[in-house]
Image: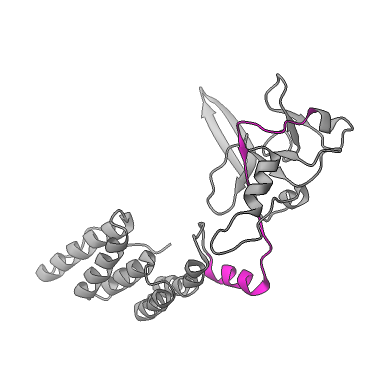
Amino acid sequence: MNWNDAGSYCSSLTLGSFSGWRLPSLEEMRGAEYFYPVSWTDQDDGSEHTWDYLGMKGGISITDSTRIWTTTPAGDQQYASVYMGPPDVFGILFKPKQWGTMLDPSRDNAHDRVSKASDHNAVLCVRSMDASLLQIAKDAEVSHPVPDLLTLKANVPLNKARQAFLAGQYHDAIAQSQSALAVKPDLREAYWGIGISYGMLGEWDQATSSLASALKIDKKYGDAKTAMKWVKDSRNAAKIGKPVKDEPPQWK
């Protein structure tokens, strides 16, 4: 998308029941709100190379040549293309014949040389978040994008369930997971949490039933399939008084 298309896309976007999206400013992109530093070392033919770049929060996949439109003017033009990666973290990228050349946005002729569009552009839409919603997001501690506000809210008790499970408080983990389902009835992770918690208590029928509910929501849910095998093996081992070879599921 060119700059105009990107701006129109964000302004007309409704995502997770929210509207009021916009392109970020260059100053916002320089902050730590969206990105985190990454250092990656590659060994090739006996030589070692280390690359320092920015990764995008929320599990969003990007490359070091991704450019993101901002609202910051470049000279008298109302667009700028943000470049992530060495030699500088951010800057305006122009592409005549030389791919990947950096251009300082403060240069007088920056607007004459900046590219309005490229084949590696990405569009990042942002919006303001009120304090109460921000607190919900912090309490949820999600490590991946969620599709809607209900899922985000459901992750608050689900996070408490995870903490209870890690502390060996499996009844509390079940109760908190059930609270998550009261908010979001089709949250597969909550059924999974109930299933593995019942499994840790040796209550195999309840464990099987809960994991089956998770798989009914998502038949390709790999964690539920793995947990179901563990429950089956554990049940069989308990019948003959032998230990289970596989480790119990981990709630990370």
Foreground residue among 165 and 223:
223
Q: Residue furthest left?
A: 240
How far across and how far down the image is residue 145, in percent? 51, 57
Residue drawn at (57%, 58%) of the image? 14
Locate residue 125 relative to residue 165 in the image: left or right: right
Taking 222 as reference, is 114 above or below it?
Answer: above
Q: Is residue 180 magenta?
A: no
Image coords of residue 77 (percent x, y): 82, 38
- Res. 130 image quadrant: bottom right
> Percent position (x, y) of residue 193?
35, 69
- Classify residue 62 as left or right of residue 160: right
Q: Is residue 159 visible?
A: yes
Image coordinates for residue 211, horizontal then vertical, percent: 27, 66
Quarter of the figure that contains the N terminus = top right
Task: Name which residue lies at 30% across and 53% down.
Answer: 220
- Residue 34 in the image: above or below residue 195: above
Segment colored magenta: 113-141
